[in-house]
Amino acid sequence: MILNYTNSFTQRYDVGNNLDDKTVSLLTSKYFASSKETRTKIFDELLSKCKLESKKIDSCLSRYKYRGNTLGNYFLAGNLINLYIDYDAKNFQQSLSKSFFYGFSTLLSIVFLYILFTLQNIKLEETIFVFVTFVVLTLTNPHILGLDFSILSSIFFTPLGDGYLPMIYVPRGPVSLLLIPLILSLIYNYKKLLIFTIFFSATIHLGYSLIFTLFSFGFSCISVIFFKEKKNITFLLLLIIIILILIMNFFSIYHFNFFENLNLKNLNLENLNLNLLTNINKFIYYFFLIMIAFLTSDIRLKKLTILIVLLGSFIKILTYLETSDIIIADQISNRMMGSFSYIFIAMTIFLILLILHKVIKNFPGMYNSKLQQNYKSFIFILFLFTFLKNIDYGYIKKRAFKDFSYKVTINNFKINSLKMRKEVEKDIDMHYNSNSIIDLSNIKLSEISDLNIDAEFEVLLFLYVNAKKLKS
């Protein structure tokens, strides 16, 4: 956890480097408890300006509608950032940049502590799963080894955007780390941990919490059918889905009808490419996963293989729906490919470790019984062989001989990441964008009519600074 405390790229905290996503998190701290009428009135004025003044009317309208609908999404992140803002600072721009860094760093620390807390009452095997996930995060961290698992083996899908680093500068980063206790609770039937993790994730990112719950509900339905588990948790998850949808609807200013926004005319099954039939390696990989799920009597292996297939299929199908313009989801599949990749890889490695343990444990007795009784072990061995065969050993060799020094390069300065807080402060102080100095007194005196509607960061900052005046 200490090794991975880099919070990605420091320039993302610079006010001159597009802080729209982070500033909308700040709005949650000011408008979370305000009435729907107040929020609607404010954003209706912004939409009117879009129609009259924007150079990109459609984009302007969709962006501010989206911002208006997500004011309640980032409760914990927004309030943590708000704690650090100093209105009396000589340079408000620098204070704001540091507040974003402190706020998201605190949020990341809380998530890490929560994961550590989950380790208190679990067994060694489950602890190994958590350890594997953090090893994957560390290996793929661009500031350490920067290992690309999609090059290492073609069975993994390619992460987009910021790669495998989910702890980046917006709420969806820290909340993606909660997949660790979520997957743990699904495999080992920790119902209380599952429910608590879902509600905790809702305080960080309401939208991702709904995705987590839908994913868990789908897996729970499969568990009821195939593993004869009790239906209590399934009904409880269904109730939570309804509650989360109602909460999102409560905070949404402009109702979003999912079915009205489905472009089914773009659906063409001939273009549905899940990279299974066209990529022989992926086909064999998923084939063996399904075989393991059906043949093994080990519930852990069954659940783990189902979760891998379920998560991989979910992201692939979502990617197809977005790239085909069947749904408009603000590139969520790209973001999930980046922030969810680590857990997909970690689950695969953990599965291999469990299989190896099972094969080694049963290996001495393989020659003392009939071949027909050992087909499961041979299936496991074939899976391992397939996985190892597809590894790019040349890539491993290339990465292994890279200079392994934990250094972060920011604006041509090499710094030790364990001094990250001090160095980030210095970096913000020295390299902030001097062309975009924030005049706080001018913002306080401004009105909505004075705003440049296409300058989204300035508009959102205006709404934050003048929240009290706008709500009165």
Image (spheres, grey):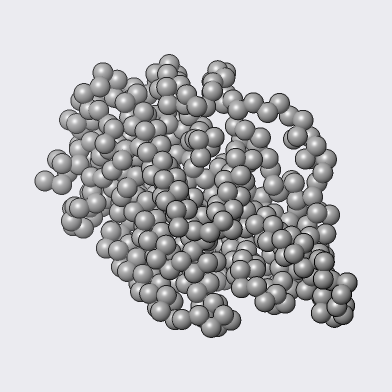
Q: Identify which residue is drawn at 82% across, 75% down.
A: 374
- Counting from the top left corner in percent of width and height, residue 470 is at 17, 43
- Please state which of residues 93 and 209 is positioned toward the viewer in this rendering: 209
Among the 4 quarters of the image, the one containing residue 311: bottom right
- Counting from the top left corner in percent of width and height, residue 38 is at 18, 53
Is residue 80 depicted above or below 384 in this figure?
above
Look at the image and tell me whether residue 110 can be seen.
yes
Among the 4 quarters of the image, the one containing residue 349: bottom right
Q: Identify which residue is drawn at 65% across, 68% down.
A: 301
Look at the image and tell me whether residue 337 can be seen.
no
- Counting from the top left corner in percent of width and height, residue 131 is at 58, 48
Q: Identify which residue is drawn at 42% across, 62% down.
A: 193
- Please state which of residues 415 and 329 is positioned toward the viewer in this rendering: 415
Q: Identify which residue is drawn at 78% across, 73% down.
A: 376
- Please state which of residues 22 and 466 is positioned toward the viewer in this rendering: 22
Left or right: 463 with respect to 396? left
